[in-house]
Amino acid sequence: MDNISKVYRIEQGYKYVEEDWWKWWVWIEGEENELDEIDYVVYTLHSTFANPVRKIEDRSTKFKLKTEGWGVFTIYAKLYLKNKSEITLAHDLYLEYPDGESNLDS
């Protein structure tokens, strides 16, 4: 694992709503001083989302993106740092039914 991957990672949370529908959220996790180096984050969601590319600038929420949907896919995040460098991360969204069964996009 390279140093960049150790510093930053995408984390997620979710809540099952009903009828194969979840509310979910992702954010950037890292040391507080490292998060302070991020200017903003651009998330790229599955192409079926309305507005699949979303810019988040709120450092106070660790650049949290909240949305909802029914399927799993890979989320990409491009971190734009204050020093003008960029870091790309990926995260496989995982959703689970209340009974513990996973929702795998088929």
Image: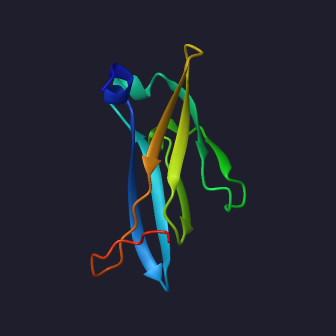
Residue at position x 68%, y 56% in the image: 47
Q: Hey, which quadrant is residue 101 in on the image?
A: bottom left
Residue at position x 35%, y 71% in the image: 102
Height in image: 67 above or below 42?
below
Relative to 66, 35 lies left or right: left
Say how the picture is coloured. Answer: rainbow
92 or 60, nearer to the observer? 92
Place of residue 14 in the rendered image (x, y in percent of width and height, measured from the top left): 40, 65
62 or 42, nearer to the observer? 42
Height in image: 78 above or below 104?
above
Query: Which residue is farthest left?
Result: 100
Visible residue check, residue 98: yes
Place of residue 81 in the rendered image (x, y in percent of width and height, measured from the top left): 54, 22
Residue at position x 61%, y 56% in the image: 46
Place of residue 96 in the rendered image (x, y in percent of width and height, measured from the top left): 36, 71
Query: Which residue is farthest bottom?
Result: 19
93 or 104, nearer to the observer? 104
Height in image: 17 above or below 61?
below
Query: Which residue is farthest front?
Result: 106
Query: Which residue is farthest top?
Result: 83
Visible residue check, residue 31: no
Q: In the rendered view of the protein, which quadrant contains the N terminus? A: top left
30 or 52, nearer to the observer? 52
Q: How many marks?
A: 0
Place of residue 5 in the rendered image (x, y in percent of width and height, measured from the top left): 36, 29
Height in image: 84 above or below 97?
above
Residue at position x 44%, y 25% in the image: 36
